[in-house]
Image (cartoon, grey):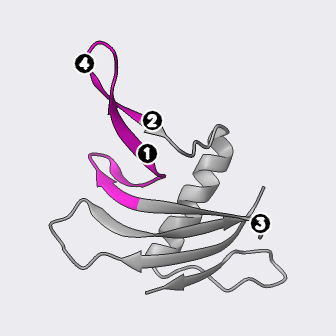
Amino acid sequence: MKVTDIKLFKVVNAASKCKANGFVTFDGALKVKFMLMEGPTGLFVTFPAEKYTDKQGQEKWSKHVELVDKGFTAEVNQAVLAAYQGNAQSQGSSGEPSSQVT
């Protein structure tokens, strides 16, 4: 699977841990919403999840999308970070993902 498109919308509120949100498209066939968050070790991409309470009363998160392959996860993170930092190039013969930042 390859990242073929990124639509990114920067968050204006500097105090927010969410720095951007948008959509990433895989192989031109699957479009998934994401958020670019700031954590203790830097920026990272997170996908939709829903908070719920389990039978023991513990709050947990249920992921709607989970990237299982660590190499692919790193590739998606790098592509989104490049788009956020304004370094992404339009898709060309090199196979780089196209991106649109708002």
Tell me how far mark 4 sits from mark 3, CA to CA: 38 Å
Residue 94: percent from left, percent from top: 81, 77
Three-letter amino acid code of the residue under disc 1: Ala
Are the residues at dot 4 and dot 1 in contact (C-beta closer than 8 Å)? no
Q: Are marks 2 and 4 in contact (CB under 8 Å)?
A: no
Span shown in magenta = 36-61
Q: Residue beneath label 2, please?
A: 62
Label located before the other in sequence (3 or 1): 3
Q: Hey, what amino acid is under mark 4? A: Gly
15 left or right of 30 in image: left
- Name the secondary structure under disc 1: strand
Q: Quadrant of the C terminus?
A: bottom left
Q: Residue type at mark 3: give it.
A: Ala
Q: Mark 1 — residue?
A: 49
Q: Amino acid at mark 2?
A: Ser
Residue nearest the observer in this picture, 34 or 15: 34
Which mark, residue 36? Answer: none
Q: Residues within 10 Å of mark 1 (few under 14, many from 20)?
A: few
Considering only vertical position in the picture, is 9 above or below 77?
below
Q: Which mark is residue 57?
A: 4
Q: Which mark is residue 29?
A: 3
> Can residue 41 be found in the magenta stretch?
yes
Residue sitting at x 60%, y 67%: 24
SS at mark 4?
loop
Residue sticking out furthest to the top:
56
Q: Residue 79: give x, y in percent of width and height.
A: 58, 66
Does the residue at mark 1 contact the one at mark 2 (Cβ under 8 Å)? yes
Q: Mark 4 or mark 3: name the one nearer the start of the chain.
A: 3
- 67 vs 81: above or below: above
